[in-house]
Every structure is written in structure tokens, then in C-alpha cells.
């Protein structure tokens, strides 16, 4: 079936001498993997630079559900980035989020609200000219709304602990180590209420921000099967030191 859809590149790997395996999240069919031939001449549409992580594309392909690797019929750049490739901090964030989404959406089927959220978020980051230090934290937390385990903030009471395995607040300590202290639970509540327009009001040190990343990655690892250590996290720690 011929399918035309928006797509977000999550990962591309070299395959042989002139091909790439490209994993994308698409608006119409969810996660799809493609094998793409990259011509050696500059005339072809399949250019390697189109398959950089988090690139927003419009693609067409014959969707064959029983085939592991689909083949593109047409491709064009949907939204050229104005700042992400040229800003070291934004680039570090986008590479981290691409790897995070690659593992966090592996089994994702058609989910237009999820796709729209990711598309709108990456466009917001590209256009942002102010403080975006908490962007990846807000992105990761709010993404959990679309994959089914966003915590219910209304259940919070002063003195609660947050059980990472259950994704719920509790007044008593769970019988496992995966929970936040009362102090950390209280700090994460404002983060859960933030959005991109208000996140600059929440000030954190570099160390506090890294602790939040660790908590959120652990949270996803507990809820998404086979969620591994993220290689790009160390790069984000080293490069992204905006307060």
C-alpha cells in the first residue's frame, strides 16, 4: 500500500558500501525501518544528510507490513533546522533525545498525538532563542503521557515518596529500592507541572539537572522493556552545562 507520511529520523546505520538502515517514527504507521541506497553522485534524492537524527521528513513508500526493511519511493526535507545543527547544546540534546526515542518507541504503532508532540517539541527547540536548559527534562516527562505512565500529580501529598516502579506517590516506603526520597519527590512536582513556556522559571544547578536525567532514564527503564544504557547521555553531561 502506497503511504505518504511525515517522519522523524531516530537512527541511521551504514549497511554495506552504499546503503543505510534508517529507523524512523512516522505519523501514519508508527515505527518503520528502511533500507536506503545512497548514490555516489549528487543528483539523487537519497542524500546521507537527510538521515541525521531528529530530521523532519516527508516520505513515500510501499508499506508492506510483513517486510522488515521497507524501501523509500520519495523523500523530501519537511522542516530545515535553523539552529540545532549549529548550537552545541541543542545538538547534544537532539542526539540524546533521538537515542532515547529510538529505544522508548521501538514497539510504537500508529500514534498521531505522540508524533505531533515530538514534531512540535523539536521545532520549538530549533526556534527557541531563550533559556532551554530544562527542555529535555520537560520533554521526557511529558512524553510519558503518550506512552501510558505519566504520574498523577493530583495524588501528591506533602511528605510523599515517589515509587518509580508503580509510577505513583506513596506515604510508605516500598519494599524495593526504586523510589525517590521525600525531598526529591517534592522537587520533582514542579517539574511535572512545567511546560516549555514556563520551564525557564525553574532554576537548577548542573548537578541537580543531571540527577533529574538519571531519575527519568531510570523511570523509563523500569517501564519500557529492554531499555538499555544510553550512550549519548555521557555526551550530554559533558557538553550541556547551561544553568
Image (cartoon, rainbow, N blue to C red):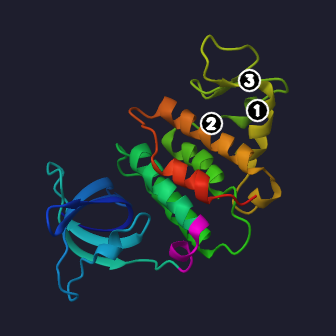
Q: Position of residue 21 (x, y in %)?
A: 23, 59
Image x and y of residue 32, in percent: 28, 55
Region rendered in magenta: 82-89
- The residue at the point 36 percent across, 52 percent down is 110
- The mark found on residue 236 in the picture is none
Residue 161's disc number: 3
Residue 230 lies, with reference to residue 218, above or below; the image says below
Viewer-side label of 1, 3: 1
Mark 2 vs 1, N-terminal side: 1
Mark 3–mark 2 Cα distance, whole angstroms, equals 14 Å
Q: Find residue 215 and name its label.
A: 2
Q: Is residue 205 left or right of residue 101?
A: right
Q: Is 86 colored magenta in this rendering? A: yes
Q: Position of residue 163 (x, y in %)?
A: 64, 24
Whether residues under marks 3 and 2 lie with C-beta atoms below 8 angstroms apart, the answer is no
- Residue at numbered disc 1: 184
Residue most extreme to the right: 158
- Is residue 140 shown above or below 178? below
Amino acid at each position: 500500500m502506497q503511504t505518504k507520511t511525515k517522519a522523524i529520523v531516530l537512527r541511521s546505520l551504514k549497511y554495506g558500501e552504499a546503503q543505510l538502515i534508517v529507523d524512523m517514527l512516522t505519523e501514519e504507521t508508527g515505527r518503520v525501518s528502511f533500507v536506503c541506497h545512497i548514490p555516489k553522485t549528487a543528483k539523487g534524492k537519497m542524500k546521507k544528510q537527510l538521515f541525521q537524527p531528529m530530521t523532519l521528513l516527508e516520505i513515500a513508500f510501499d508499506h508492506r507490513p510483513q517486510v522488515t526493511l521497507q524501501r523509500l519511493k520519495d523523500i523530501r526535507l519537511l522542516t530545515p533546522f535553523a539552529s540545532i545543527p549549529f548550537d552545541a547544546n541543542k545538538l547534544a540534546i537532539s542526539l540524546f533525545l533521538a537515542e532515547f526515542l529510538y529505544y522508548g518507541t521501538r514497539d510504537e504503532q500508529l500514534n498521531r498525538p505522540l508524533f505531533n508532540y515530538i514534531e512540535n517539541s523539536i521545532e520549538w527547540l530549533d526556534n527557541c532563542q531563550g533559556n532551554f536548559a530544562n527542555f529535555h527534562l520537560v520533554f521526557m516527562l511529558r512524553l510519558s503521557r503518550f506512552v501510558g505512565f505519566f504520574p498523577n500529580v493530583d495524588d501528591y501529598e506533602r511528605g510523599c515518596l515517589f515509587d518509580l516502579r508503580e509510577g505513583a506517590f506513596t506515604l510508605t516506603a516500598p519494599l524495593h529500592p526504586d523510589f525517590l526520597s521525600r525531598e526529591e519527590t517534592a522537587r520533582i512536582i514542579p517539574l511535572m507541572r512545567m511546560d516549555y513556556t514556563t520551564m525557564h522559571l525553574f532554576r537548577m544547578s548542573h548537578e541537580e539537572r543531571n540527577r533529574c536525567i538519571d531519575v527519568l532514564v531510570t523511570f523509563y527503564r523500569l517501564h519500557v522493556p529492554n531499555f538499555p544504557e544510553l550512550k549519548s547521555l555521557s555526551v550530554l553531561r559533558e557538553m550541556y552545562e547551561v544553568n
